[in-house]
């Protein structure tokens, strides 16, 4: 898959999600170790239960963090003849199961039947999250996670395969200057990414 470097913006909610899932894991442990007869145990839906989603999020953070805020000395992605610079792309292999778990986690956190205690936990961490220059609202956290999952699950095409092959053939630390065919493939792929990530925003498209 191809991961675009948007200066860390796609990963911004993952630390908050990790904290939410860590709290849920602790609550589950407390319920098992000290069950109360007069209260029902917390209803934690899959895949939030049992630290399943937590493990996936931690793996994704480990794999994705190096793809963001890359310094120029790691190699630039350039248009033909070096006319201008694109946002860096990283060819990466991630477990499909982890991406599926991220998508399912976003769906679970956004479900209207979510336990109120979990909903309050999500609200608290959303208030502490900053997206760009503003604080995120709870629905934005869930939406952000869902869009990240969609970005990571971008279906492969001839364009993505062409770009992946070129990136993997480029030695680390050297610039990758695209051919005309690769530039056209990049434009189509960036359009697809921008549609998922920024709902097709013309302004955001220039980031790629």
Image (cartoon, rainbow, N blue to C red):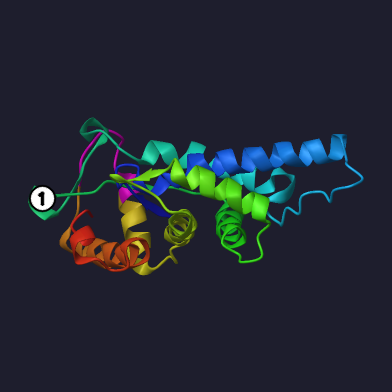
Determine the residue positioned at 52% across, 44% down. 124
Estimate the x, y position of residue 71 in percent, counting from the top left. Answer: 25, 33
**Start and end of the magenta stretch?**
167-176
**Label 1 secondary element:** loop
Estimate the x, y position of residue 7 in percent, counting from the top left. Answer: 30, 42
Mark 1 neighbour class, 10 Å CA radius: few under 14, some 14 to 19, many 20 or more? few
The image quadrant that residue 151 belongs to is bottom left
| Left or right for 45, reference 89 | right
Give the main secondary structure of the magenta stretch: loop
Q: Which sits in the foreground, 17 or 150? A: 17
Decide if residue 73 is in sight here. yes
Q: Quadrant of the C terminus?
A: bottom left
The image quadrant that residue 115 belongs to is bottom right
Q: Relative to 5, is 198 above or below?
A: below
Residue 23 painted magenta: no
The image quadrant that residue 2 belongs to is bottom left
Estimate the x, y position of residue 154 in percent, counting from the top left. Answer: 43, 63
Give the residue pinned by disc 1: 84
Decide if residue 58 is in sight here. no
Q: Which sits in the foreground, 201 or 183? A: 201
| Left or right for 164, reference 83 | right
């Amino acid at each position: 898959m191809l991961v675009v470097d948007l200066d860390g913006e796609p990963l911004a909610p993952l630390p908050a999600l990790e904290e939410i899932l860590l709290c849920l894991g602790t609550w589950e442990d407390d319920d098992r170790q000290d069950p109360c007869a007069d209260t029902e145990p917390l209803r934690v839906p899959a895949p939030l239960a049992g630290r399943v989603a937590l493990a996936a999020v931690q793996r994704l953070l480990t794999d994705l963090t190096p793809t963001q805020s890359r310094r120029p000395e790691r190699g630039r992605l350039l248009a033909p003849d070096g006319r201008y610079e694109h946002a860096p792309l990283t060819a990466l292999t991630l477990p499909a199961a982890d991406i599926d778990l991220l998508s399912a986690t976003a769906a679970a956190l956004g479900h209207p039947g979510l336990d109120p205690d979990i909903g309050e936990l999500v609200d608290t961490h959303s208030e502490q999250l900053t997206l760009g220059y503003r604080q995120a609202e709870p629905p934005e956290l869930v939406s952000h996670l869902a869009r990240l999952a969609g970005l990571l699950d971008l279906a492969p095409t001839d364009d993505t395969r062409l770009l992946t092959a070129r990136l993997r053939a480029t030695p680390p630390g050297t610039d990758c200057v695209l051919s005309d065919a690769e530039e056209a493939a990049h434009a189509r792929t960036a359009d697809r990414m921008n549609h998922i990530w920024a709902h097709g925003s013309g302004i955001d498209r220039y980031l790629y």
